[in-house]
């Protein structure tokens, strides 16, 4: 037994001396659990800052109440104005707010038209424009908006109806009429009579499609939401078009990190030493590695998108030049990331372990797997610092929205900038490190 305990202790000593094993066993799962927990409600934060364009042309009380409710929700960043081509700030109209969503500046737009509701109306009219570039996010937005509308409108229309009956028939007869109406509604829609006569007590979940909620079904008929998808209707396979960019950039990072780490294999096998004894300098070796990795990244992404076209009918040819520009910029950024890891690592195992942690973390917070808006605001800030965010959004702009060069210039500049900074730092570290010694 003593020998067993001694071997048991030695196993733990060897394990904790291996930083890579510790990293993969504890740090990687903890980081991913934190990210997943933040997204799926562990922090009880919910989605935050989803851009929602809003136009209230109605002068009714319900319009004011819906606008006030939206203004106080952390889930939305309510936008009521925009800058035109001259840089002048203007309030939305029915045309510009729709174009705002089509151009990708907001996930959706809610419009309360002039005739949304009046004292003689029997229903509330709402227009809802949306861009389902992320299906989970748009379903959440639709649910939240219905929740807001259903929590504000039904009590107002019912109170208005009760008062109109009392004005038209007199207080006594009007109340008798309202009680009769409540009995009829209760009989056919299974609605509590006391709730009908006291609308201020109503509470609605916003789940209009729930057949078990008879009260909700009844009031679904008095809220007319005119929904219009403004982007992506023509795509043959919306799901694949939305997903391909995120998965492609994740696998690209893994491939190029592994390719960069091959420097350690070349050093161990003696290839590096033999090269340095020939008329080849360190600069030549690094440049050849950069060019090889970058070309490999371009080839890998091209093959993945071609595969998506063959199998899932993703349209890659109608906007191919802009797609290829994003592929080049993404490959440059990911190549530099892989070389940076190799420069600061002492062994191949260390580079692979650290790479696994950073790649999975960047893919999660960069929006490759989940909407960025589902993450806490602090993580959303770091999302924009990752090449995953800009590469994936660039692929969406090209494939989903079909934008031209002007629509992806920002993405290309930032990806090239990330690649340039990472390359300068890695070259500086390569000169100081012992990879060539």
Image (tube, helix red, strand yellow):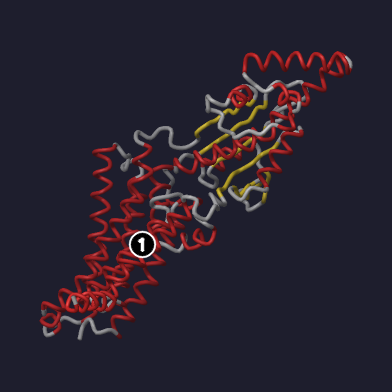
Looking at the figure, which quarter contains the N terminus?
bottom left
Q: Is residue 250 above or below residue 102?
A: below
Q: Which residue is tagged 1?
A: 29
Q: Where residue 267 sits in the image (x, y, percent)?
A: 16, 78
> In the depicted view, which residue is nearer to us: 281 or 341?
341
What residue is rendered at 60% in x and 31% in y? 127
> In the depicted view, which residue is nearer to us: 3 or 316?
3
Q: Where residue 190 sits in the image (x, y, percent)?
A: 62, 19
- Horizontal relation, residue 294 to residue 71: left or right: left
What residue is rendered at 13% in x and 80% in y? 275
Quadrant of residue 153 within the rendered picture:
top right
Q: Is residue 186 above or below residue 240?
A: above
Q: Secondary structure at mark 1?
A: helix
Asked whether residue 169 is in view, the answer is: yes
Q: Is residue 404 above or below residue 16?
A: above
Looking at the figure, which quarter contains the C terminus?
bottom left
Disc 1 residue crowd, few under 14, some 14–19, many 20+, Cα 10 Å: few
What residue is rendered at 59% in x and 38% in y? 145
Quadrant of residue 325 within the rendered picture:
bottom left
């Amino acid at each position: 037994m003593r020998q067993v305990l001694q071997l048991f202790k030695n196993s733990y000593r060897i394990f904790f001396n291996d930083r890579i094993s510790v990293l993969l066993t504890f740090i990687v799962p903890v980081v991913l659990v934190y990210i997943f927990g933040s997204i799926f409600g562990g922090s009880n934060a919910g989605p935050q800052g989803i851009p929602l364009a809003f136009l209230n042309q109605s002068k009714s009380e319900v319009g004011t109440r819906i606008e006030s409710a939206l203004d106080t929700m952390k889930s939305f960043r309510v936008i009521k104005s925009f800058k035109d081509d001259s840089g002048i700030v203007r309030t939305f109209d029915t045309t510009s707010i729709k174009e705002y969503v089509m151009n990708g500046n907001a996930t959706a737009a809610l419009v309360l038209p002039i005739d949304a509701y009046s004292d003689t109306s029997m229903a509330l009219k709402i227009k809802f424009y949306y861009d389902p570039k992320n299906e989970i996010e748009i379903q959440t937005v639709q649910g939240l908006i219905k929740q807001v509308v259903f929590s504000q409108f039904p009590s107002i229309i019912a109170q208005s109806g009760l008062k109109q009956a009392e004005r038209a028939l007199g207080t006594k007869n009007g109340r008798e009429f309202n009680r009769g109406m409540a009995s009829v509604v209760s009989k056919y829609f299974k609605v509590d009579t006391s709730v009908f006569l006291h609308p201020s007590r109503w509470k609605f979940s916003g789940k209009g499609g729930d057949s078990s909620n008879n009260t909700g079904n009844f009031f679904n008929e008095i809220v007319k939401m005119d929904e219009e998808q403004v982007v992506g209707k023509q795509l043959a396979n919306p799901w694949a078009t939305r997903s391909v960019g995120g998965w492609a950039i994740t696998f690209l990072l893994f491939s190029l990190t592994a390719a960069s780490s091959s420097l350690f294999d070349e050093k161990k096998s003696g290839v590096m030493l033999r090269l340095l004894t020939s008329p080849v300098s360190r600069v030549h070796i690094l440049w050849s590695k950069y060019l090889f990795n970058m070309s490999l990244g371009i080839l890998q992404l091209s093959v993945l998108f071609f595969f998506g076209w063959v199998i899932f009918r993703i349209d890659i040819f109608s906007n191919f030049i802009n797609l290829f520009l994003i592929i080049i910029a993404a490959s440059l950024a990911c190549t530099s990331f892989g070389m940076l890891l190799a420069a600061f690592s002492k062994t191949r195992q260390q580079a692979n372990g650290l790479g696994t942690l950073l790649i999975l973390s960047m893919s999660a917070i960069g929006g490759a797997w989940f909407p960025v808006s589902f993450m806490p605001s602090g993580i959303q800030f770091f999302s924009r610092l990752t090449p995953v965010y800009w590469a994936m959004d660039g692929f969406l702009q090209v494939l989903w929205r079909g934008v031209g060069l002007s629509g992806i210039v920002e993405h290309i500049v930032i990806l090239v900038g990330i690649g340039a900074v990472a390359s300068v730092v890695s070259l500086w570290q390569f000169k100081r490190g012992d990879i060539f010694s």
